[in-house]
Image: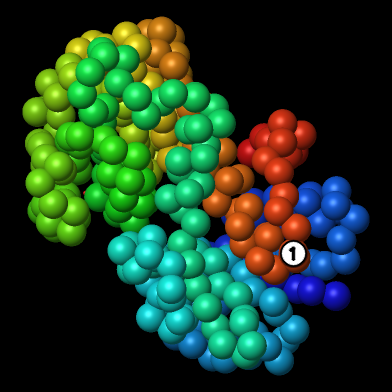
Amino acid sequence: MKRAFVVGYPIAHSRSPLIHNFWLRGLGLEGSYERVAVPPDAFPAFLDTLGAQGFAGGNVTVPHKEAAFERAVVEDAVARALGAVNTLWLEGGVLKGANTDVAGFLANLDQSAPGWDRTASGGGPPRAVVLGAGGAARAVLYGLLQRGFGEIALANRTIERAETLASHFGPKIRVLSWQAMEDALAGADLLVNTTSLGMKGQPPLDIDLSRLPGAALVTDIVYVPLETPLLAKARRAGYRTVDGLGMLLHQAVSGFERWFGVRPVVSEELRALIIADI
Ligand code: ATR
């Protein structure tokens, strides 16, 4: 029987076991997917024992994505660009790693808002505003550049972090102050929140959307709650919105395929199962 894991610290909140065990059951496959809590100082030792524990591989979450990148053999261009690995597998005894967060972010928008990466104003490449400067923002910037976004305004509470992040990507990323960001919404096709604002237990992200064009799409990386205060405000103002749950579901697909040999589908039934748990 094949085993897979999600490793993090803490890990109790992870919905990944629900996702993978839903697919295992639905596909009639023998296998297991379990949460493993490993503090940072024990992470290298955990990786050393994967084969002995019978693991085919697993997912990596906070705070281990960078350490996993350091330890694994990484051929995946996305993981190399981000310096972070969220999917591990053993191949002939060698620990390999990839990053599926970018693919998850893009597949979620492709499925939920087809045409999201084309500008509504006609002509020219689409433009985005991205909020936040952590690991999630880095994945989002990479994905948007991959899809041909022409100009991306990046704003973060700590502007220095945004400047450092932007320096990895080149001239298409324009760092703005929070106030200037609200003005920059005027030309945007897409607004992405990657900050933890709006997450359950955190203050809401409260920004003035009045300059954002009516055809723009608003999306959030946060999925607890499913409809964040930002998405609720955008929806009430008539914008198309996409919640963050789909990114979690889609980033899981290629790991499952590697460990268990079948490519699973992100279905409405799976979404409903996770929503019932949120
Ligand atoms: P991740 O890797 O998931 O993106 P992170 O590195 O912890 O997470 O980044 C969290 C993001 O949320 C950061 O952009 C952070 O802003 P700072 O860089 O200024 O810390 C943002 N964030 C968290 N709490 C915030 C708050 N109360 N107000 C504004 N931004 C906040």
Q: Amino acid at mark 1?
A: Gly
195 with respect to 176 (left or right): right
Report the side of 245 relative to 79 (left or right): right
Q: Position of residue 250 (x, y in %)?
A: 58, 46
Using the image as rendered, state which of residue 222 and residue 145 is in the foreground: 145
Image height of 157 relative to 46, above or below: above
Q: Nearer the viewer, residue 195 or 119?
A: 119
Q: Quadrant of the N terminus?
A: bottom right
Q: Look at 41% across and 8% down and name the residue there.
A: 238
Pick whichever, 255 or 39, lies toward us: 255
Q: Secondary structure at mark 1?
A: loop
Residue drawn at (72%, 31%) of the image: 268
Check mark 1 vs ligand 1: CB closer than 8 Å? yes or no. Answer: no
Task: Say which quadrant the C terminus sits in.
Answer: top right
Residue 208 image position (x, y, % from top left)? 23, 18
| Residue 230 appearing in the image | no
Q: Quadrant of residue 262?
A: bottom right
Question: Residue lying furthest front in this view?
Answer: 123
Which residue in the protein does label 1 denote?
261
Which picture quadrant has residue 66?
A: bottom left
Q: Is residue 155 above or below residue 137?
A: above
- Could you tell me which residue is drawn at 13 percent across and 52 percent down? 170
Local crowd size for mark 1, using a 10 Å CA cut-off: few (<14), some (14–19), many (≥20): few
Q: Is residue 236 visible?
A: yes
